[in-house]
Image (cartoon, helix red, strand yellow):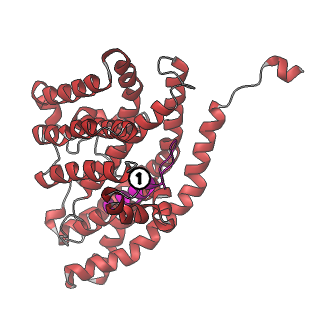
Amino acid sequence: MSTTRGWSTELEGLRGFASLWVLLGHASLLVHCAIPIVSMPSIGVDLFILLSGYLMAKNYIERQEKEPWNSANTVKKFWIRRFFRIAPLYYLLLIIAVAYGPWFGEMRDTIAQFYPSTATETSRYSDQSVANIIAHISFIFGLLPEYGFNTVLPDWSIGLEMQFYMLFPFIMLLTLRLGYVPTLLLIMLLCTIGRFVLAGYYEAFIMPSMILIKLHVFIAGMLMAEAVRKKQLVYLLLALIAPVVSAIIAIGVSKLQIVFEAAMIIGMTAVLWQHRPGSLMEKLIKLPRAILTNRVSTWLGDVSYSVYLVHLLIVVPAIALLLRDYNMDALSAPLRFAIICGICLPLTYGIATLLYRFVEKPGIQLGKRVLAPRPSAQDVTG
């Protein structure tokens, strides 16, 4: 069930299925088993982006009375919360990704020897330069074409997310001056114009890790939040401008992904909308809501960030070793996919559960301690 304020349980399920989608998508691609829709992990990433835009807007608006948007302290709190939500786990796995990068590169080369169509520039896995490390620690790598896709981690989207967090408070401040809809539509327009004015910069990215390439999708999530909050379909219609912008920008996006982008915007809004009891829409979304809010889906959502970040550290070597040492290539594509799922799903989710408990949650708590009010000198001496 959704709560009026704070987190909506359905969102946990959506996050959980998004991370599972990305995992299964990468696994299917790397074992050379084409599965309709599943073999497009980029759609799962788009779902994450929509969720992020939705949640940031929803939570920021709900906290407005206690945390005014024009207060520097509000902006500081927002950035600190987001940093400690993302950074602790990311830094831990970044150490592993860089330290063992050459080995992961060898594993990736092994897969490419069996399935050349899966080949990628594996030298990026072995980049242990100071410049690459600093770019990733500072989270500016997403803005730099040569570093935006430069580790074994699927962290291009993490850099993208951090860029959105950096911009978001200023976007919300601008809405106070120009209005919510005019501001968000103006940003979509600027992203579109940038595609032509900065064509070389846009096209230099292997993955869409630069914020202007994907900002309109975050904006769509923000418009969805307003549609659900105000129960006005006009915001949903405006959110559907985002797939049009995606088609124009067309960096790292397929026609099918654009169609799914539109479908996800409509579907998410339908599920999160509070429909009239007994209405047809309430009956139609009853099953999706039940699926998204059950215990398994909630758990999938809890560990989704860990699953997303860690899965390639498990999937890549598992596939490479099975191909090299156990002749997995002699099996049919569906059987290869089934075997790798049978091995990697338990491993990934088991490790992710530990990471969630011992890294993510303590990181979040550390952020809360940083934000906790400091006792005054009078309190200490009194």
Query: Which amino acid type is shown beneath numbered disc 1?
Result: Ala
Which of the two residues, 297 or 44, is positioned nearer the viewer here? 297
Q: Residue furthest top?
A: 177
Please provide percent x and percent y for residue 351.
51, 64
Q: Position of residue 105 (x, y in %)?
A: 30, 58
Q: Position of residue 15 (x, y in %)?
A: 40, 54
Q: Is residue 21 above or below residue 246?
A: below
* Residue for badge 1: 97
Please say whether residue 248 is visible from this viewpoint: yes
* Residue stretch rendered in magenta on the structure: 1-22
| Secondary element type, mark 1 | helix
Residue 144: tell me if it is visible. Answer: no
Residue 289 located left or right of residue 258 = right
Q: How many marks?
A: 1
Most prominent secondary structure in the magenta stretch? Answer: helix
Describe residue 230's horizontal placement relative to residue 293 as left or right: left
Which residue is depicted at the point 50% across and 30% down? 78
Picture quarter containing residue 243?
Answer: top left
Which residue ends up furthest to the front in the rendered image?
278
Instruction: Look at 20% across and 54% down and name the residue there.
Output: 260
Residue closest to the eye, 354 or 214: 214
Query: Which image quadrant: the C terminus?
Result: top right
Residue 121 lies in the magenta-colored region: no
Q: Is residue 9 left or right of residue 186?
A: right
Residue 13 is covered by the magenta coloring: yes
Q: Nearer the viewer, residue 319 or 247?
A: 247
Q: Is residue 308 above or below residue 5?
A: below
* Residue 77 placement (x, y as % from top left): 54, 28
Residue pictured at 34% horizontal, 60% vertical: 285
The residue closer to the viewer here, 157 or 275, is 275
Residue at position x 22%, y 85% in the image? 331
* Residue at the right extreme of this rendering: 382
